Image: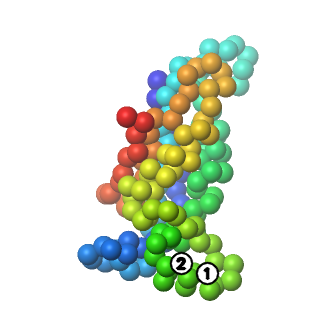
Amino acid sequence: MRITRRLEFDAGHRIPDHASQCRHLHGHRYALEVTLSGAIIKADGAAVNGMVMDFADVKRIANERVVARWDHAFLAYRGDSAVVDFLASMPGHKTVVLDVVPTAENLAAEAFRILDTAYRDTYGNDLRLERVRLYETPNCWADADRG
């Protein structure tokens, strides 16, 4: 069985080598979908009976590990030193410095890496992260799959 939880956040970024508009500082309303697989839990009397994982727990983990850290932050590539230095000059600015260019593809892969060990098989139902889908816009997204 597969289940998916969607969370949304706002963040800024730039793609320094982009040939068009994305080379400029800008932001998006991102949506992050976390897809897990596992057997349906059969545990009479347990709060998770009949579930793969409680959607509230899926949300809590994704929020703690990714969404709360990236929401209303500027996602900057470490190699984009002009932007990293500029953001560092603003006291208290929420900046997340990444080792990859913050494209939808790289952000989806980074979120998958961060979340992969966070969803644990605590009920013996073979729970595991299968996919992270990151929407950069309603019409553009990237999938990072276990694949």
Q: Which mark is residue 142?
A: none
Q: Nearer the viewer, residue 143 or 17?
A: 17
* Residue 94 % position (x, y): 63, 72
Kind of residue sitting beneath label 1: Ala
Per the image, the residue denoted by label 2 is 84
- Compared with 24, 105 (above or below) is above
Q: Residue 74: x and y, percent?
A: 53, 72
Asked which secondary structure carries label 2, the reply is helix
Give the CA separation, mark 1 to mark 2.
Answer: 6 Å
Q: Residue furthest right?
A: 45
Left or right of 147 on screen, residue 30: right
The C terminus lies in quadrant: top left
For the point 44% across and 50% down, the residue is: 109
Q: Give whichever of 97, 51 is nearer the camera.
A: 97
x and y, in percent, of residue 102 in the image: 44, 64
Instruction: Please name the residue shown 53% across and 78% down the image.
Output: 84
